[in-house]
Each structure stands twice: as structure tokens, then as C-alpha cells.
Amino acid sequence: MAEGKKSLNFIEQIIEEDLQKDYKKENLKFRFPPEPNGYLHIGHASSICLNFGLGEKYNAPVNLRFDDTNPIKEEQEYVDAIKRDVEWLGFKWEKECYASDYFQQLYDWAVEMIKNGDAYVDSQTSEEIAEQKGTPTQPGTESPYRNRSVEENLDLFEKMKNGETPEKGHVLRAKIDMSAPNMLMRDPVMYRCLHKSHHRTGNDWKIYPMYDWAHGESDFIEQVSHSFCTLEFLPHRELYNWFISKVSKPGDFEPKQREFARRNLSHTIVSKRKLLQLVEKGIVDSWDDPRMPTISGLRRRGYTPGAIRKFADSIGVGKRENLIDVSHLEFCAREDLNKVAPRVMGVLDPVKLVITNYPEGEEEWLEAENNPEDESAGSRKIPFSRELYIEREDFKESANRKFFRLTLNKEVRLKNAYIIKGEDVVKDEDGNITEIHCTYDPKSKSGSGTEESLRKVKGTLHWVSVKHAIEAEIRLYDRLFTEEAPDAVKDKDYINFINPESLKTVTGYLEPGLKDAKPGDKVQFQRIGYFCVDRDSTHEKPVFNRTVTLRDSWAKIKS
Ligand code: ATP
Ligand code: MG
């Protein structure tokens, strides 16, 4: 076997086998077919990476096809958002296609099918039709309208198309077999009447094709070679083939549908319909709320396209559904951000530290490396002065030997600065610490090369100079749900499992260089986590979102 074939996934194996048989490389063509009824989520990212990844691997075209057959739920806003997200992930489509562009062709084919006795207008209610479906073990019942004449069918179908029949009056059904073992083959509905305006075709159509009728035919029109969809469509495959066989001619290239397992992510939900509910109920602010598992939410949260692609590629495609722990997605974010995010200092829960032997009114600008993982990132200057903020949890008046942060009579290093020693505390009437007093060793400056600077101390703290710090709103995001699989808990709605602490907002004090940060900029607040500048941010009031903490804090809670 040739190099690189060892790790083929089952989808690639299908393609390789087809290439060995009668497919040519030029036949290969894929598509990503979202319905524009919401924003794309992390599950879609798997499908995008699969289809566009195959395109890259086989140097084959990939179409972006909007499956826009339901005007009730679809909107231009969603089309725009989907295009933005696919582009942002770094993929290029060959053609931007719409099922709605094929409405006329689909209609003409349906007319042909009526003429050939393969379709008929049923004038029963949807309830009556459902009752006649039968069960997997019992055949269905034929509709009393099944044997209408071709003329009557053509006449009624045209009236449906022109909006001359009531919405619920008639449907067009394929005439297949009411006792077929596959219930989807029991005369499936091809068209319903809907007197709704469509975001692209306006009021041109009063009938709209159903998914099964539109999807395979769209693949056929575009000459897609492999139509990959999620496993719930496996039983639809027979119908997919049947519909294509009704419109293709001998020798035509026919697409094939193959299925892979849906990807689910823990502590969230991946369903556009349910995500829309979160937006509509005001549980989140918008589709791109940084707690949403949407691609736009992840982007606003500070995820990089690289992190999402790495995530999708590392979980790969499978034949069985499973739940991927969100910590794996977070891991991918850390890996990517570690390489690209400049290190900065920010204090999120400040307590004042006064260096009593540092001259009042004096300040100095210290050299600080921007990213130890990337030499080319260079360095910057940060201001140091007599009064600093440090993190409240980095000080304890009395602590055991394992506490490697600041305590009285012990030394720690201030990152990029000096070694200090805790001396005293000032408290308010209630006993809360308002100031910590310490002394510093002037010879211990980081990087100065002196004997004192090389002295080993346990613990290094981050800090900012009180006088120079800028204030920023810090949005501390956490998982949106407390439950692993919130929409799979028996008898309970996922709304019950919203994490009340999914967003905490605090005021942070940051080194002054960050006042020029732009929306989308990513940084690591040293010792805390990765953050990114939110789109709400202004020069006067910077806003940072926490993308992910430096370590997996949930793992600690579990163990
Ligand atoms: P939703 O229920 O969220 O609307 P959907 O499957 O109806 O999902 P579509 O817009 O029809 O959404 O999906 C476009 C493509 O993305 C389809 O091929 C679909 O199978 C795939 N897809 C959707 N969700 C997932 C998922 N969780 N994992 C993998 N692929 C997915
Ligand atoms: Mg759908």
C-alpha cells in the first residue's frame, strides 16, 4: 500500500475504492449543504472540515450549497453569517449554490414524473396521510387520490404552483410503494403549498420542494460525486437514489450519498433550532455570544480558525455518534494560542502592594519578553513603581510551606522585575487587607545578571503599576451548561442545566500598552489565561473576553 494510505478514514476509503473502480479524479466533487436557518456551530465545523478537507486532499471542487427550501425559517442574515464563517475557517468554495436556483428545474422534473405516472396530487390532510403510513411491520394504505388521471394531476399541480389552492389543500407525492419495508419509500411528499415569501425567490413560488426531493437532485445538477451527510439520513439513501434515477439518463454520472456520525460536544448543544431558542429566550445575548458553540461565538470568544480545524481534524470522522468532551476543544485553543498570543500582565482581583523602600515618585520601564515560544515576537517595556496591584489570592498572611506565593517574611519574584519580601499588612475595620507592605532588593532586577538577580526564589507573581494601569471590563466566560449532555437528560429540558456562573464580569487592571488593543486581538494574561478583545471594546472602555484558562480547572473539580 502506498505511503499515507495507512491512516485513511472510512470516508477516504470509500473515495479510494471508487477511484480504483470507475471514478476518475476529475469526477470528484463535494459540497457543504447548510440550511440557512441559523448560525453554524461546532458540529458543522466537522462537516466543513470533512468536505473542504477532501477538496484540498484530492484537489477537487467543493460547492457551498444553501439548502433553502423552507422559507418559514430561512433568512438572508443566516446566509451571510454562514459565508463569513466558512471563509473565516480558511476554506474556499468553488461555487455558491442555492437549492432555490433549481426550483424551476425541479418543477419541470416533477411535471415529467406526473406524466410518467411517478407522482400524484394527494388532497388529503397531513393527518390522514400520516395515519395511512402504516408501521415498520404493517404496510400503509393507498390514498384514494393515488390513481388520479395524469390530466387532473397536471391541472391541480399547476394550480398549486400558482397559489390557486389553499395552503393545506394538496401535496404532490411520489408514487412508489405503500408497502415498502422502508417507510420513507411509502409515497413520500415532494411538494407542499406554502404561500410564504422566500428570501431569494420572493413570491415567485407558492409550492416548495421537500428536503429529499431537492437534495439529491441538487447534487445531481451540480454533479457532486460524494454527498456526505449525517447518519440519520441513512434510511433516506434509498429514496435519494430513487429520485435521481427518475431524472437521470443512461450514462449520466450519478452522485452517491454516504453517511458519517454527527459530532456532539459536551456541556453544550449543537442544534440550530435549540440555539435559536437560547437567543430568543434571552439566555444568551446573541448568536455570537461568546458562550455559544457557534463558529461566530467561538470566534468572538477568541478561538482561532487553526484551533477549530485542529479540533475537527483530531476527532476525525466516525461511524458511531459520541460525545466529545469540551476540554478537548479547549486544549486545541491553548495549543494554538500558546504559539501566537503575546504575554501581558493584568490583575483581575487586585490588592495594593506598597514597596516601602522604593523611592516615592520614581518609576522605571522594564524590559519584558512578548512570547517565550516565539523569539520573533520581541519585547516591550512595562512601567514599575512604588505601588503595584497583585492578585489578592497571591498573598496569605500565614501560609504553609507549599504556598509559593507572597507571605510575610518570605521572598518571591515579581515577573520581569525584582525580588520582594513581605513585611506587613494594613487592614480595615472588618479585618480585610487593604495594603500589603513589602521591601525589594534593588540589585535583583530580572535579566541584570547580578548575583542577586540569579538568586532562586520559589514563586513568581504578575503585577501592574497602580499609577499606570488601565481599567478594563473583563468577561470571565465559562461553560454554558453544567450537565455533560444537557439535551439528553430524561424528562428534563436543557434549560434546567444553564450554568449560573457562565459569565462573571470583573474590572481588571492591565499594563498600559493594552489601551491600543483592537477587537479580535488575542493575549495571554500571564498565570491566568488567554483573552481576546471583544467587539464591544472602545478606547475609553476596553473589554476583554476570557477564551480559556491556562489549565483545565474542571478536571480538578472532577478528580
Ligand atoms: P441542526 O440541527 O443544527 O440544524 P442540521 O444537520 O439540520 O443541524 P444543516 O444545515 O442541514 O444542519 O447541516 C449542514 C451539514 O452539516 C449537513 O451535511 C449536516 O449533516 C452537517 N452537520 C450538522 N450538524 C452536525 C454535527 N453535529 N456533526 C457533524 N456534521 C453535522
Ligand atoms: Mg436541518
Image: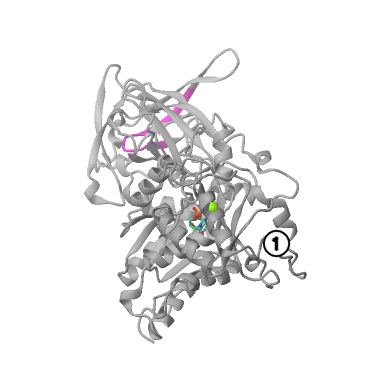
User: Which residue is labeled 1 in the image?
Assistant: 143
Q: Nearer the viewer, residue 174 or 38?
A: 174
Q: Is residue 144 left or right of residue 475?
A: right
Specify whether residue 413 is painted magenta. yes
Q: Which residue range is magenta in the image? A: 412-424
Residue 53 horizontal/vertical position (percent): 37, 64
Q: Is residue 339 left or right of residue 298?
A: left
Q: Which amino acid lies under the numbered mark 1 shown in the image of this protein?
A: Ser
Say if 199 sits above or below 428 in the image. Answer: below
- Name of the residue lying farthest toward the top: 429
Residue 79 horizontal/vertical position (percent): 40, 45
Residue 48 found in image quarter: bottom left
Q: Is residue 113 left or right of residue 305?
A: right
Residue 242 horizontal/vertical position (percent): 54, 72
The local secondary structure at tag 1 comes to loop
Which quarter of the rendering shows the N terminus? bottom left
Identify the residue at horizontal 57%, vertical 59% (top origin): 153
What's the image's color scheme?
one colour
Residue 530 visible, this orientation: no
